[in-house]
Image (spheres, rainbow, N blue to C red):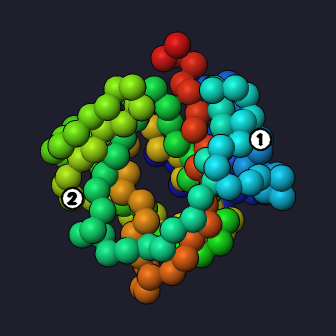
């Protein structure tokens, strides 16, 4: 897991070439051309899903993790908490390899408070619960970069 400021995203280059593409975009912090839905940066290797929602109580959500893609979360407007835990410590309740999704229940090991200017990279071992309210529920506009890990091809 990497939790930091978008202005510093470039310091994490070199982990994976597809992640480098996402980090370059994030460091510039220019989302003016990004529209709701899927925004392709490099085919199915790197793309951005943009969407919005209202945050909720932690008890209403669940953890998810992915085997082939890593996620880079960027809150464009609003504020949310993202809870994380090593997936090996959680209880799996569903899995869909076709969509690269596994759902989990359990207890968070860490919590990242996300607001504009922050970013969070979650790797395959990092299960994450999103949409968690901070002090109060609010509306969030968000970009999630889906990054195919080069060593998973």
Would residue 83 appear left or right of 115 to someone viewing this image? left
Task: Classify 24 as above or below 150.
Answer: below
Question: In terms of image quadrants, where is residue 119?
Answer: bottom right
Task: Give the camera-side residue of 17 and 146.
Answer: 146
Task: Classify 32 as above or below 135.
Answer: above
| Secondary-structure class at tag 2 | loop
Mark yes or no: residue 14 visible.
no
Q: Position of residue 112 (x, y in %)?
A: 45, 64
Task: Classify 97 as above or below 114.
Answer: above
| Secondary-structure class at tag 1 | helix
Question: In terms of image quadrants, where is residue 94?
Answer: top left
Task: Give the camera-side residue of 140 and 13.
Answer: 140
For disc 1, the marked residue is: 24
Q: Residue at x 74, y 35 (%)?
A: 41
For disc 2, the marked residue is: 107
Q: Position of residue 86 (x, y in %)?
A: 29, 44
Q: Position of residue 137 (x, y in %)?
A: 44, 82
Mark 2 nearby-residue class (10 Å; few <14, some 14–19, many ≥20): some
Task: Classify 23 as above or below 74.
Answer: above
Q: Residue at x 52, y 13 (%)?
A: 153
Task: Give the camera-side residue of 99 and 63.
Answer: 99
Label whose residue precedes the other's in the sequence (1 or 2) = 1
């Amino acid at each position: 897991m990497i939790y930091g400021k978008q202005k510093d995203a470039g310091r994490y280059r070199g982990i994976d070439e597809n992640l480098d593409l996402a980090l370059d975009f994030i460091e510039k912090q220019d989302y003016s051309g990004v529209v709701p839905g899927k925004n392709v940066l490099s085919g199915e290797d790197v793309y951005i899903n943009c969407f919005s929602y209202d945050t909720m109580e932690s008890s209403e959500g669940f953890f998810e993790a992915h085997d082939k893609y890593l996620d880079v979360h960027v809150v464009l407007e609003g504020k949310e908490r993202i809870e994380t835990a090593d997936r090996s410590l959680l209880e799996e309740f569903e899995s869909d390899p076709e969509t690269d999704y596994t759902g989990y229940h359990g207890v968070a090991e860490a919590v990242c408070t996300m607001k504009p200017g922050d970013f969070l990279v979650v790797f395959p071992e990092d299960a994450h619960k999103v949409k968690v309210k901070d002090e109060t529920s609010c509306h969030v506009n968000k970009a999630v970069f889906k990054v195919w890990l080069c060593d998973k091809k």
